[in-house]
Image: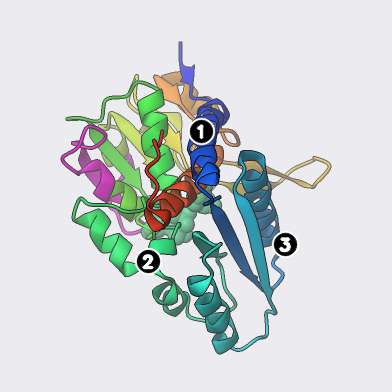
Amino acid sequence: MTTIIDGKAVASEIRADLTGAIETLADAGARPGLATVLMGDDPASQTYVNMKQRDCEEVGIEPHHVDVPGDAAPEDLYEVIAELNDDPDVHGYLVQSPVPDHVDYRDVIRRIDPMKDVDGFHPENVGRLVAGDARFRPCTPHGVQKLLEAAGVDTEGADVTIVGRSDIVGKPLANLLIQKADDGNATVTVCHSRTDDLAAKTRTADVVVAAVGIPELIDGSMIAEGATVIDVGVNRVDADTEKGYELVGDVDFESAKERAGAITPVPGGVGPMTRAMLLYNTVKAASLQEGVDVELP
Ligand code: NAD
């Protein structure tokens, strides 16, 4: 029997565990605050930002939001960033990506106070992660680690193949899983668009993580019998639904399920975990900035 890893359930446990820490902070006069910044009016980004705001409200984190017109100068965005860096009520914030073409996202990231960088993308936080001393683990890779733990998958000595080398998923996840740590100690192979014979790399893995952005690229024939499959992909494909599309992962769920020992669905797998780990990082940011110790899940 294949286990379907329920990301919604694991995420809701983490959120429940975080509420204790949030109350401890609030009692000390330091209710955590998270700000989102949206430049432009991309509908998908708007949806993501709304979800993050709602998540905050549900767990008792104070949500803040700043809209920046899509045609504003980069300096206008930098001004917003400087204000958030100085705002004591905002413990963490993020600038929703993608930003318009005339803005260099790396310039944006470098301006964020690393102590408030709850996405974990600032070079200082990336460096700390690589050095094995992470301050903020990026939300999606951290969520994948928590899902593996919840599914009882021991990464120590495991062969893990990650498909995708992005700065937000593939690279940080690879770095986390090779750390000498209980939730690391894996032997990691990172595949990407120039990988020769992808199937040969996935077929021998105990754990396959797909973070590519190509619908159903990985099918059952590319999975070892009994392997764990974590599907990070979220792709809109045309479908005869009310919205005119449906969401599918980077894994062909039906065929992969036939061979995998455990697999995440899309939606309901990694997505809810990413959202929960943003709340986790916000609570951690507040705890560090306010000097109030809390127990994190
Ligand atoms: P990206 O576009 O930045 O990177 C994609 C990676 O896939 C690249 O490293 C590229 O080299 C690799 N790739 C492209 N074609 C390939 C091929 N044929 N074979 C092997 N590798 C190939 O993507 P990203 O931001 O990491 O996102 C990947 C997917 O994950 C997207 O569907 C995205 O929507 C989704 N995502 C989901 C969450 C979540 O919370 N569920 C979070 C982040 C990203």
- Residue at the limit of the structure toward the front, as seen here: 28
Q: Residues within 10 Å of mark 1 (few under 14, many from 20)?
A: some
Q: Is residue 284 visible?
A: yes
Which disc number belongs to residue 98? none
- Which residue corresponds to the image point at 45% horizontal and 53% vertical from the top-left? 286
* Relative height, residue 234 to residue 251 (above, below): below
Q: Residues within 10 Å of mark 3 (few under 14, many from 20)?
A: few
Labelled pair 3, 1 in contact (Cβ < 8 Å): no
Q: What's the distance in space between the residues labelled 2 and 3, CA to CA? A: 28 Å
Q: Determine whether the residue tagged by mark 3 lies in a helix, strand or loop.
A: helix
Comparing 158 with 106, the one in front is 106
- Which residue corresponds to the image point at 50% horizontal and 26% vertical from the top-left? 255
Q: Say whether residue 270 is left or right of residue 59.
A: left
Q: Earlier in the sequence, mark 3 or mark 1?
A: 1
Comparing 161 with 130, the one in front is 130
Q: Say whether residue 56 is left or right of residue 290.
A: right
Residue 198 falls within the magenta-colored stretch: yes
- Which residue corresponds to the image point at 41% horizontal and 70% vertical from the top-left? 113
Q: What's the distance in space between the residues labelled 1 and 2, CA to CA? A: 25 Å
Span colored in magenta: 175-200
Which disc number belongs to residue 20? 1
Tell me which amino acid carries mark 1. Gly
Comparing 227 with 123, the one in front is 123
Position of residue 85 measured from the top left corner of the image (x, y, whole percent): 48, 72
**On the image, which quarter does residue 149 sit in?**
top left
Which disc number belongs to residue 114? 2
- Which residue corresponds to the image point at 31% horizontal and 61% vertical from the top-left? 125
Q: Nearer the viewer, mark 1 or mark 2?
A: 1
Q: Pointer 3: what residue?
A: 43
Tell me which amino acid carries mark 2. Pro
Residue 194 falls within the magenta-colored stretch: yes
